[in-house]
Amino acid sequence: MLKKTKTIITCAITGSIHTPSMSPHLPVSPGDIAAQAIAAARAGAAILHLHARHPADGRPSPDPEHFAAFLPEIAAASDAVINITTGGGQGMSVDERLLAAERFSPEMCSLNMGSMNFALYPMLERYQSFTHPWERAHLENSRDFIFRNTPGDIEKILERLGKGHGTRFEFECYDVGHLYTLAHFLDRKLVTPPLFVQSIFGILGGIGAETQAVFMMRETAERLFGDQYHWSVLPAGRHEIPYCTMAAVMGGHVRVGLEDNLFMGKGQLAPSNAALVAKMRHILEELSLPIATAEEARAMLALKGAGQTRIMHNHG
């Protein structure tokens, strides 16, 4: 692992997992996504990971016009690194998942390192009623949903965004096998260090949120990547704050946000993305772990710079 002097906080603003009925604070309109992203950056997030939603009913959307309704506003009001999803949401093709990233040519995109079951249906036990008809179906359909990320898909994304746009990646690794897939692409020189390796814990279909799992994912990455990577941790749900804290003490970076977790504490909904960032930042600073600015994150991750994106002059 590359020596870390400061901790990068990524904030994932809305995602495509949670539905509007689960929390009134989940941003789904363009205005709310922009406002919450800007506030999260001001609270200390160096990287903003962004999905779009249909403004009418909050469904996940791959439409670049839906991204165009908030990306320029965020870029104008913040110097945070904008990281656009290529994971998209249930039922989107790989080409659809690339539409926004290819249009806006961001500094960074997420890139999922393997096909997997991505099961959300256990959440049906927690919610009795939904505002929109799509919400229950979204959860129920995940029983038979395979989140597709084949080696060919990964090659396509690396070619079109990496080579084509100079975009770098948040390599999302939901299981130990995903680390070996990333190592395969490193061996083929299709990815270039420094790698930003995001270890994800607690999604049904991926590795569980357990202390030993965190150690194993880090130890495996150490063997495979040595001093060619930065390590970050994304724990889902109630595991977010404690496991991010553990990882930060172990030399990792952290990801928080309403995409990954809706709660500040047991039974207490997080009022905003900024609140989660502020909580994480407070804990890190109490532990004498300084927070990276957006510019420091750019330097650590060798990003091309905000001026090389097409976010500000490719909307409307």
Image (spheres, rainbow, N blue to C red):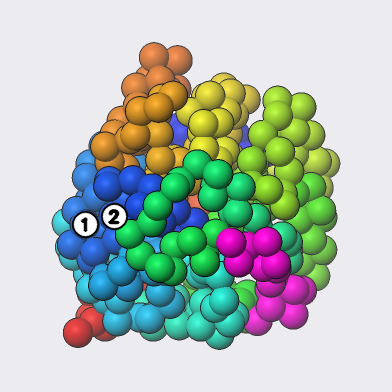
In reply to whether residue 40 is colored magenta, the answer given is no
Tell me whether circle 1 and circle 2 mark residues in contact (CB < 8 Å): yes
Whether residue 197 is situated above or below residue 185 in the rendered picture = above
Residue 27, label in figure: 2
Q: Secondary structure at mark 2?
A: loop
> Per the image, is 151 magenta?
yes
Q: Is residue 160 above or below residue 176?
A: below
Residue drawn at x 40%, y 74% as measured from the top left: 61
Tell me, yes or no, if residue 3 can be seen here: yes
x, y (%) of residue 7? Answer: 46, 34
Left or right side of 304 for 142:
right
> Which quarter of the picture shows residue 210?
top right
- Please, what secondary structure does the residue beneath circle 1 have? helix
Q: Amino acid at mark 1?
A: Asp
Give residue 58's quadrant in the image.
bottom left
* Residue beneath the point at 69% across and 78% down: 153
- Residue 225 placement, left or right of 129: right
Q: Find residue 222 and report its horizontal and vertical position in percent.
A: 76, 39
Q: Residue 32 bears which disc, if any?
A: 1
Span shown in magenta = 140-156
* SS assignment for the magenta stretch, majority: helix
- The kind of residue on which mark 2 rests is Pro
Q: Please report the residue visible at 59 percent of the width from the left and 80 percent of the height from the top.
A: 94
**Residue 297 in view, yes or no:** no
Depth check: 242 or 294 in front?
242
Image quarter (top left, top right, bottom left or bottom right) of the N terminus: top right
Rendered view: 199 above or below 140: above
Residue plotted at (52% across, 38% down) = 237
Residue 262: x %, y % from top left:
40, 40
Residue 97 in the image, given as x and y percentages of width and height = 52, 77
